Amino acid sequence: HGLTMDRHGSFFELHHQWYFICNDQSFPGSSAHFRNSVISYVHYRDNGEIEPVYLNRLGVGQYDASAPRIEAENYFRLIHGVKKECPAGGFEVRGLGAQSSLVFPNVRNLPANSLISLHLSCAHPRGGTVEIRRGSPNGELLGKCKVPETGGWASYRTVSTQLKNSAGTHDLCLVFHGGPGELFHLDWFRFQPAVKSEGSPD
């Protein structure tokens, strides 16, 4: 098909994340000579093969809080961790310990005081804590979520906490705390509007 040819693609790595960038001719109403740049995440399977690359209008380095979930492997910056295939399918981030963090800038459509839910596994006997901060590991603390031991790395649990944030677009950083060694395998997370307590006004 004419619109899928002539990509002129390149691969590169930044902040422990791989990307594919190319030109694109698929913008609605564009001619065969139209050129635009598109970029997407690249994920490598454990056997070294490349997972199919998907291009969308969101691109990279920005996220939509109204989406059903945000995949952890689509981070913008990773400090101390590794991206691997997930036993349940897709990918996850492993090796998350007390010196680890994940940065997700430009998270759009966040409701005020969002409820964040994280889907992860924890084999550490004492569990750990995930902090949600603004922009960096030392940024303003928006919320904190305690995570118990889930029954092993193959046993996942969804844990939630309410944030203290204004509505709109925010740069978010997940910061991991706990005892020595590996603490978490993070699969995905999602946002929902704040949970209203009984008797609270609409």
Image (cartoon, rainbow, N blue to C red):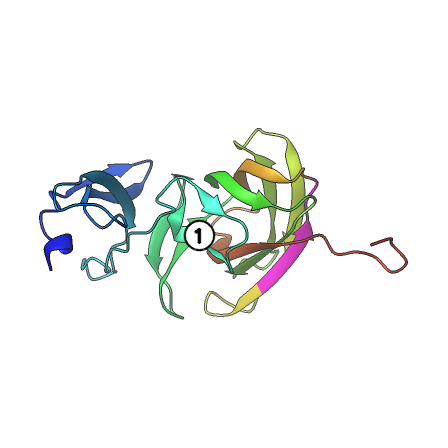
Judge whether residue 94 can be spotted in this image: no
Q: Residue at x 54, y 49 (%)?
A: 65
Image location of residue 66, percent across then percent down:
54, 53
Q: Give the quadrant of residue 131.
A: top right
Looking at the image, which is closer to me, 197 or 31? 31
Image location of residue 75, percent across then percent down:
41, 45
Looking at the image, which is closer to me, 98 or 61? 61
Q: Secondary structure at mark 1?
A: helix
Disc 1 target residue: 72
Image location of residue 133, percent across then percent down:
59, 36
Q: Main SS of the magenta segment? A: strand
Quadrant where the N terminus sits is: bottom left
Q: Residue at x 41, y 41 (%)?
A: 80
Give yes or no for residue 161 being in the magenta stretch. Answer: yes
Give yes or no for residue 194 being in the magenta stretch. Answer: no
The stretch in magenta equals 158-164
Image location of residue 92, percent across then percent down:
40, 57
The amino acid on which the numbered mark 1 sits, given as a three-letter code, is Ala
